């Protein structure tokens, strides 16, 4: 994402200036125009740093998604009971503890008192409030159902948070196990084994073959530890640099959805997120074309983004989304058929919600399967790694009595 500085006139003929993050200049211009701004200047770069603005951005960076969900829920309750928006924001700020969200809430409340639309005030903090929430608030301002929409936002963000946590939990377990195995192995090879070797060196004993092999690895690691660390650092930096290139990112994204064990999990994750977001937007009155553009940003995978770009191009050419999803390898045939039927019958938001619910259930099962497969694999990996070193340590001990007697 790039940062663009803009100057524009709003709907009240007031001149505005600020920054916006977008992939291209045209994307930034489209976002500003959808917000009702008449752009007079748009250029790449950032404005001169303001200390107060910097402190505000730092505070915004500390806001967690759970706090945003609580904010939407509390605001929904107050608005649905008839409390005006400005009073609801003041009440929320008054009862909030000191922190990033309280500071952001104070700024939003000031914007509302100054006559700025709620959606525009939220859009000033893209790191705090996701684009889906801003779009839904803009739709609610037109329909007058902001309380109901905030409740829907809280439900949507809660489900997204739960799904993301499941994915992270499933991937965190093997990463921790591998890290522990490598740490224990490094400790045994570089600290324990050399001390055992001294016993046999002083007794002129011949180490067993497995022990000699592990000792060779140990000596290599101790002698060349700086080169090993440098090589690991270079490899990590190389992977990061490769990930930042277009071809590298597409390769990593393809691995995510094609690997044997975790591939099905990621495919269901992207499908659940896309259908839930699209269904929520359409049910809230957002046009299909705008909804597709927004969904392209929530499926953080280049191949899925290509799918939405193709869908947008197809729709602007007068075609239906069914013509795209039915020929896509990313969307399972049953889900594609349901989407096609929903589009034909005019019940696409309801069908998308059902698809999201069904795929969410499948995702839960996929995560359980991944965990069940990874757990024995990690046990075998740690057993072979640490157990092999333990055997190399124990083999000489079996002969220690004979060695000491000589």
Image (cartoon, grey):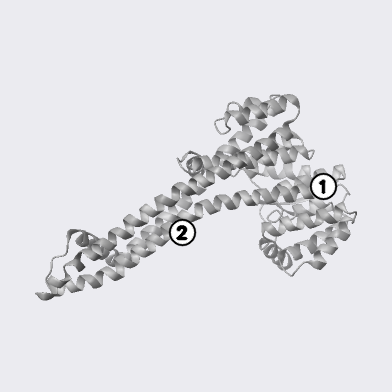
Residue 303 spot, x, y in % from top left: 55, 37
Residue 179 spot, x, y in % from top left: 42, 60
Task: Please report whichever mark, 1 or 2, sits nearer to the chain's N-terminal start.
Answer: 1
Residue 148 - label: 1
Residue at the spot x=74%, y=25% of the render? 345
Look at the numbered disc 1 and give the secondary structure of its residue: helix
Residue 135 spot, x, y in % from top left: 76, 45
Instruction: Note whether 211 is above or below 357 in the view shown.
Output: below
Residue at the spot x=26%, y=63% of the render? 220
Residue at the spot x=22%, y=62% of the render? 216
Nearer to me, 85 or 341:
341
Label 2 Cα crowd, 10 Å radius (few <14 / some 14-19 / many 20+): few
Question: In the rendered image, is residue 1 in sight?
Answer: no
Nearer to me, 235 or 76:
76
Q: Mark 1 to mark 2: distance in Å?
A: 42 Å
Label 1 Cα crowd, 10 Å radius (few <14 / some 14-19 / many 20+): some
Give the residue number, with chain letter if any, for mark 2: 176
């Amino acid at each position: 994402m790039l940062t663009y500085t803009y100057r524009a006139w709003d709907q009240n003929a007031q001149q505005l200036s600020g920054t916006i993050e977008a992939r291209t200049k045209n994307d930034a211009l489209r976002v500003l125009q959808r917000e009702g701004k008449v752009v007079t200047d748009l250029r790449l770069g950032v404005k001169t740093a303001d200390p107060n603005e910097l402190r505000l951005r730092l505070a915004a960076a500390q806001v967690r998604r759970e706090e945003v969900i609580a904010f939407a829920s509390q605001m929904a309750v107050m608005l649905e009971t008839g409390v005006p928006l400005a009073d609801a924001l003041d009440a929320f700020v008054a009862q909030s503890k000191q922190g990033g969200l309280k500071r952001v809430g104070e700024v939003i409340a000031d914007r509302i008192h100054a006559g700025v639309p709620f959606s525009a005030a939220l859009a000033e903090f893209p790191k705090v409030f996701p684009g889906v929430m801003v779009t839904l608030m803009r739709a609610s301002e037109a329909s007058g159902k902001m309380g109901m929409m905030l409740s829907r936002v809280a439900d949507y963000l809660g489900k997204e948070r739960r799904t993301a946590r499941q994915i992270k939990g499933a991937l965190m377990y093997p990463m921790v196990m591998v890290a522990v195995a490598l740490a224990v192995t490094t400790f045994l090879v570089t600290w324990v084994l050399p001390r055992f070797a001294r016993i046999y060196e002083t007794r002129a004993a011949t180490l067993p073959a497995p022990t000699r092999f592990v000792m060779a690895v140990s000596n290599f690691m101790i002698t060349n530890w700086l080169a090993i660390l440098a090589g690991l650092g270079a490899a990590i930096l190389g992977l990061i640099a490769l990930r930042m290139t277009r071809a590298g990112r597409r390769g990593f994204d393809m691995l995510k959805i094609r690997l044997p064990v975790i591939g099905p999990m990621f495919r269901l994750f992207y499908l659940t997120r896309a259908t839930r977001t699209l269904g929520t937007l359409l049910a809230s009155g957002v046009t299909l074309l705008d909804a597709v553009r927004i969904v392209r940003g929530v499926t953080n995978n280049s191949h899925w983004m290509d799918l939405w770009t193709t869908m947008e191009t197809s729709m602007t050419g007068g075609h239906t989304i069914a013509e795209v999803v039915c020929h896509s390898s990313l969307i399972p045939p049953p889900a594609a058929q349901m989407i096609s039927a929903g589009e034909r019958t005019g019940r696409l938001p309801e069908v998308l919600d059902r698809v999201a619910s069904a795929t969410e259930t499948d995702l839960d099962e996929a995560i359980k399967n991944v965990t069940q497969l990874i757990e024995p694999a990690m046990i075998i990996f740690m057993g072979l790694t640490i157990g092999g070193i333990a055997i190399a340590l124990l083999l000489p001990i079996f002969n220690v009595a004979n060695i000491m007697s000589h």
